Image (tube, helix red, strand yellow):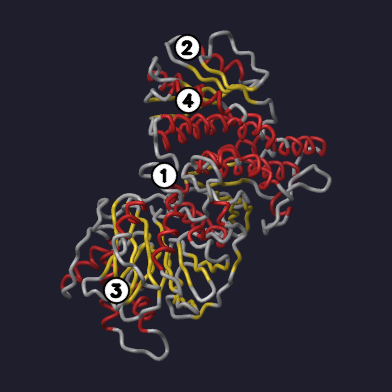
Amino acid sequence: MCGIVGYVGKLKAAPLILEGLKRLEYRGYDSAGVMVCQDGKFVLVKKAGRVANLEKEAAKVRLTGHFGMGHTRWATHGGVTDANAHPHISSDGQIALIHNGVIENYISMKKFLLTKGYQFVSETDTEVLGNLLAYHYAKEPANAEESRFVSAVRKTLLHVEGTYGIVVMALDAPGELVTARKGSPLILGIGDGESLVASDVSAIVSRTQSVVYLNDGEIAHLTPSSFSITTLAAGEVSPVIDKVTWSITDAELNGYTHFMEKEIFEQPAALENAMRGRFSEDGSTANFGGLNITPAEFRNMDRFMFCACGTALHACMVTEHLIERFARVPVECDYASEFRYRNMPLFSNTLFFVMSQSGETIDTLAAMREAKRKGYKVLAINNVVGSTIAREADGGIYQHVGPEVGVASTKAFTSQLLIGGLLSLYIARMRDMSFSDGVQFVQALKGAPDHVRTVLMQAEHIKGIAKRYAKYRDMLFLGRLSLFPIALEGALKLKEISYIHAEGYPAAEMKHGPIALISEECPAVFFVSSGEMFHKVINSMQEIKARGGRIIAIATESCQLPDGLADEVIIIPECHEAVLPIVATIPVQLLSYYIAVELKRDVDKPRNLAKSVTVE
């Protein structure tokens, strides 16, 4: 949510900032702005809508300054207008600010500032923070111990309640940026004669691969040739410079129409990357580095708790099924946003997992902190090295699938499913799973990429189905056991990028209410697999067919569907129970994608959505 880019160095700032903003478009936003300092004044351009709109406006203005900042805004306080877009300049003209997050006590701050003569032209909490910074900056005396600029930012933030990732410029401090974070990610880029700051490494990786991840409560002071970090309490911080392990070409379209399409077709390689080096030498179990928990401690856990949001929660639900099925340990999944506010009775020997592709999801981060506050060890499953969740967790598992740019998660989700399978194998082999069953499990997981390739070969067939079903305004997704969370995910994908209303249910629950929705205008997507649930699912399909509903069946190869029962059939390979959810996901990703394309939706930037949700 929202995007931040700041630059100070030897080059013109505006082109670099605009390039960075384009690379942050996937995060979700509704307006954008850019500002540089030149000739002793702030030069500001901001515009509601896409970065392309901003770029057109910026081309009309002479932007030659060598330090500046830009922002993409996802509206929280105030509507989508030019005035509410960032950056904001204080009413005395001395301070400029961009901000991710929410200032909870902005109303009382605004009342105070009005009594001091400060004026407001927007509806945002950010402008209030900018004016408070200006108030403290005007009062701040010169101090040999610390920059007046940094000191004013520190004193201001001590009055702030809420979350923030900010970049600040002062008119009489040319060539300096001050940035600080609490709950909203910020990354410093350390270049040759230049310094950068961004909310996502993708915005700065074209300039440098040397980065510093700011922690909550830290303030950074940037100049072209140096940077320093202190805490809100004025303590010095010794920074750790990390290296980004991927290049900007990893986040290019490379001939695909959309990033979502590219990332769907990258999944075989992404799954191979996610499992690389994670099998034991004897091929009977999984290995993980970085868990920071001994096998004995793991084995003594009586219960596992998973917290996540959105798509990641669906992956947790599949993992719950697999761990209970193969390791025979109780598992509970909870919405991270609910867990943090519930007074849930917890067992002493419980191990927590949080799952987040970005590692910055604010609700998941808060749930992790709540579990740690209660004395529990928390492991993280996430994709972004150096993310806040990865740094604060007691240990964890990286997905290693590279940057995911499309807002609707695809390769990150299937890699989470794969890691859930690896985890269930790891725990099961500690308990009562035999060596031979473990070997069989490992071979099944290793076969997942080829099964996914097989399904991707049906893309044209699924595109044809999508063209026929794009006209419908409602759709149901129905599955049993480990395929129920895939039904939820299928419904979510369709909603996210096509804006068609869709719901996911366990197939047996259909007759307990949702069957009232069935008509010729409400198709149903069924997941059908061989085994004990086959006839149960067929019965549910018959109930829908008897009421005039149309059916799309996603069925494994050995399923013998009654003639005429399904209007459309997508065949997927027969595979192990731990791999089936991964393979079954591919058809609904493709179906949702092609329906959205048919409806001419903005697939990679769906309305109202953000890739990384960093506000409550």
Assign a secondary structure to mark 3: strand
Distance of label 4 from label 2 (alpha carbons): 20 Å
Asked if the residue under mark 4 is in contact with the one under mark 3, i.e. CB atoms within 8 Å, the reply is no
Amino acid type at mark 1: Lys
User: Which of the two marks, 4 or 2, is nearer to us in this view?
Assistant: 4
> Which is more toward the observer, 263 or 228?
263
Secondary structure under tag 1 reads loop
**Residue 407 picture location, percent across and down:** 46, 45
Q: Residues within 10 Å of mark 3 (few under 14, many from 20)?
A: many
Marks 2/1: CA–CA distance: 36 Å
- Of badges 2 and 1, nearer the viewer stands 1
Q: Label 4's element?
A: helix
Amino acid carrying mark 3 in the image: Ile
Task: From the image, tell me which residue sits under label 3.
Answer: 95
Q: Amino acid at mark 2?
A: Lys
Q: Is residue 304 left or right of residue 140?
A: right
Residue at the disc numbered 4: 466
Report the residue at 27% width, 76% height from top.
94
Residue 137 occupies quadrant:
bottom left
Measuring 29% from the left and 52% from the top, which residue is drawn there?
Answer: 48
- Using the image as rendered, state which of residue 555 and residue 367 is in the foreground: 555
**Residue at image mark 1:** 605
Task: Give the mark nearest the N terminus, 4 or 2.
Answer: 4
SS state under label 2: helix
Q: Is residue 161 visible?
A: no
Q: Which residue is located at x 51 percent, y 20 percent?
A: 552
